[in-house]
Amino acid sequence: MQHIHLLGICGTGMAALAGILKELGYLVTGSDEQAYPPMSTFLERLGIKVLNGYQPQNLEPAPDLVVVGNVIRRENPEAQAVLARNLPRLSLPEALNRFLVGDRQSIVVAGTHGKSTTTALTAWLLQATGRDPGFMVGGIARNFNANYRTGRGDYVVLEGDEYDTAFFDKRPKFIHFRPRLAVLTSIEYDHADIYPDLDRVIQAFEGFVQQVGAGGRLLAWGAAPLVRQVCGRAAGDVAFYGLQEGNFWRAGEIEPGSGGMNFTVSRDGRHWGRFFTPLLGTHNVWNSLAAVAVLAELGEEPERLQKALTGFLGVKRRLEAAGEYRGVLVLEDFAHHPTAVAVTLEAVRRGYPGRRLVAVFEPRTNTSRRRVFQEPYARAFKDADLIIVREPPDLWKVPEEEQFSSARLVEDLRGRGQEAFYFPDTDLLLAALLERLRPGDVALIMSNGGFDNLVPRLAAALGGEK
């Protein structure tokens, strides 16, 4: 049995790869620092041994292959041992190509926003129409209760991440994928820790669209001039999707429905079908339109897609309802980029009219901890009635002159006439939140991390009664 060892195994993508390899019959081990739930328990359930800490002896006996996650730096002692011993190694995307995609056709979804939902939805539509896909997505797809699936069908759906690949390969991860069919949802500045400016982001996405070779098909969001500019570098055919006339795939007649959104789809100027997505917000109509278009490009008819789309359960922590406690509805979302914060708040405002909207935000990403978005965040919260912001965690990791200021954000919001408060830590924030919440409120918790278990702590403090 071939032995494969994963460095940084507790990362979301690496843990998914571990599960894939285990399912395919490999002996899988891994190492990480401070392994903790949910990934530690997930790997334990799979029977995968996780070594705590990085050290050369973790490579005894020598594995047949080492997969190196992008969290691993060159100076890591275990990585140094891999190099010194010249052990065979792959990055995460290279391993996905070899072990998950293989000789199957990959469908890759890339973009600054919406890629996790669009990837999970595309995988679900493939599954619901009998195509038994493999997939990997950067969140837990609730229809599968997992962020990966090996599948036996002809297609593998992958979330195309623009973050760097590994310490030995600084190219974006999605450069390693060569899809025949791909989706580009959006392009904005993000990942300030690895991209110094928007031009470098544009260059990365130009590289991605060039991976869709001649004979391939790229579905791209047509409303963004920057997306259209980048698609000018595509080698394959490009079909734009969006809300305006002139897009090959177009959504129209958008209106909120019971627990979701109704919309029509036109194909090349002709009505193609009317759909309902059980997701809130116009931005999720965009995501749904992209996924429906993918299936249509594969030959699927609208009737089966109409039924399949209504069964999509979403992705965990993407506008997920944690519950309603003492009249307070608690929602959780991954939003961290200003654009994502704005569209998420707009979706909740439209989805729960007449209720006070309380936005609770933790700027936690490498980009949101930087002042590059200081001004845009002040405009992103316009749909919230009350805003509560935490000090960015681990702010010391950012040079002082580049640090984001939650206190300044609150000052700016107050200057715009909004009720806003700043707290240095989650304990103080929770206490203040509990003082201010009242029955009928919708509390939207936004963070790309655990937020110090704020959601379960809030639910428990509210009594845990629905």
Image: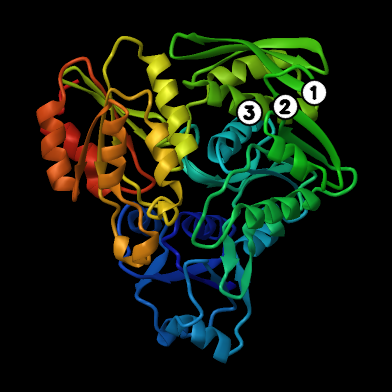
Do tag 1 and tag 2 residues touch (Cβ < 8 Å)?
yes
Residues under labels 2 and 3: Cα distance?
18 Å
Q: Residue furthest right?
A: 214
Relative side of 52 to 106, left or right: left
Q: Nearer the viewer, residue 91 or 350?
A: 350
Above or below — where is 286 with respect to 180?
above
Q: Which residue is mark 1?
A: 248
The residue tagged with tag 3: helix, strand or loop? helix
Amino acid type indicated by mark 2 = Tyr
Viewer can see residue 13: yes
For residue 241, the mark is 2
Do tag 2 and tag 3 residues touch (Cβ < 8 Å)?
no
For marks 2 and 3 on the same chain, the one whose residue lies earlier in the sequence: 3
Residue at 60% across, 38% down: 119
**Quadrant housing the C terminus:** top left
Q: Which residue is mark 3?
A: 125
Amino acid type indicated by mark 1 = Phe
Residue at 30% across, 48% down: 450
Figure quadrant of residue 252: top right
Above or below — where is 458 with respect to 98?
above
Residues under labels 1 and 3: Cα distance?
20 Å
Q: Residues within 10 Å of mark 3 (few under 14, many from 20)?
A: many
Amino acid type indicated by mark 3 = Leu
